[in-house]
Image (tube, rainbow, N blue to C red):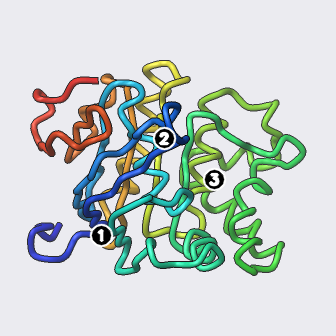
Amino acid sequence: MTDETTRPPAIRVRNVSKTFGEGTASVRALRGVDLDVPDGMLFMIVGPSGCGKTTLVSILAGTLDADEGTVEVLGERLDTMSRSDKTRFRRTNVGFIFQQYNLLPGLTAAENVAVPLILGGIQKRRAEGKARDMLAKIGLGDRTQAFPRQLSGGQQQRVAIARSLVHEPRLLVCDEPTAALDGETGRAVMEIVRDAAVKEGRAVIMVTHDSRMFGYGDLFAMMLDGAVEGVTRDVKEVHA
C-alpha cells in the first residue's frame, strides 16, 4: 500500500464549524475542526456522546452544510456546491452504513442492494445481477431472495454493507455500524468493512463507541466538545 504521506488526503477540512439553534438555545456542535483523512485506510472517529462525531461525518458526506470552513472531499469542494450538485456527488461517490440497517421491508435482499445502482440509471435486471454478485462476496449468496424480516440482525447489516458498496463508492461512511450487534457478528461485519477500506482511492470513515472494534482501525481522530483533539495510530491511546 502506498504511504499516505506521498499523496494528498482524500478528505481535507479546515476551520469547520456548525451551530444548531439560535440565541440562548443554540448548541455549537463543531468548533473550528481541522482534519485530513487518507485513502486506503480505516479511519475511526471516536469520542464521548455529543462531542460532534456524527455532525462531522454528515458534513464530510455532504448531507449537512457547515456554517464556516472549507470541506474538500475527493478533490471536490463540498462547501461551494449547490444542493443538487451534492446529491449527484453522493449518488456517485458515497456509500453509507448506519447502526439502523434502513432496509426497505417490501424488497428482497438483492432488490435492496440494487437500489443505488437503479438510482444511478442502471437497468433493473443488470442492477439486481450486480447486487446478487455483491451479496455472494459477503457470504449471503443463498439469501438474495429473502426479505429483511427473514434475516438476522447481522445478515441485515451485511445486506446494508453490500448496498453501500455495490456502486463502488470512493468514500464509505459508517456511523456506529456494530453498536446493535453481538461481538462475533460485529467482528464479521468489521472484517468486511476492513477489506473495503484497504483500497487505494477509497476513503473509509467510521464513527464508533464500540471499543471492541478499535483493533480494526488504522488511524483514530479523537473528538471532544466539538473539536478534534488529536489523530493517532496507537490504539492504546484511544478511549471510547
Q: Quadrant of the N terminus?
A: bottom left
Task: Identify the residue under disc 1.
Answer: 10
Task: Tell me: residue 193, above or below residue 214.
Answer: below
Apparent side of residue 29 relative to residue 230 in the rendered image (left or right)? right
Which mark identifies residue 175? Answer: 2
Pick the residue in front: 35 or 212.
35
* Label 2 Cα neighbours within 10 Å, binned few <14 / some 14-19 / many ≥20: many
* Label 3 Cα neighbours within 10 Å, binned few <14 / some 14-19 / many ≥20: many
* Label 1 Cα neighbours within 10 Å, binned few <14 / some 14-19 / many ≥20: many
Residue lying farthest top?
182
Apparent side of residue 42 relative to residue 137 in the rendered image (left or right)? left
Amino acid type of the residue tagged 3 in the rendering: Leu
Residue 14 x %, y %: 25, 63
Q: Of marks 3 and 1, which one's residue comes earlier in the chain? A: 1
Apparent side of residue 55 relative to residue 68 in the rendered image (left or right)? right
- Residue drawn at the location 44% of the way across and 59% of the way down: 66
- Residue drawn at the location 59% of the way across and 30% of the way down: 154
Apparent side of residue 105 relative to residue 84 in the rendered image (left or right)? right
Asked where in the image residue 117 lies, by quadrant, the reply is bottom right
Dot 1 and dot 2 residues touching (CB under 8 Å): no
Amino acid type of the residue tagged 2 in the rendering: Asp
Rounded to the nearest angstrom, the CA distance separating label 1 from label 2 is 19 Å
- Residue drawn at the location 35% of the way across and 80% of the way down: 75
Mark 2 or 3, closer to the camera? 2
Residue 87 x %, y %: 63, 71
Which mark identifies residue 90? Answer: none
Amino acid type of the residue tagged 1 in the rendering: Ala
Which mark identifies residue 135? Answer: 3
Secondary structure found at label 2: strand
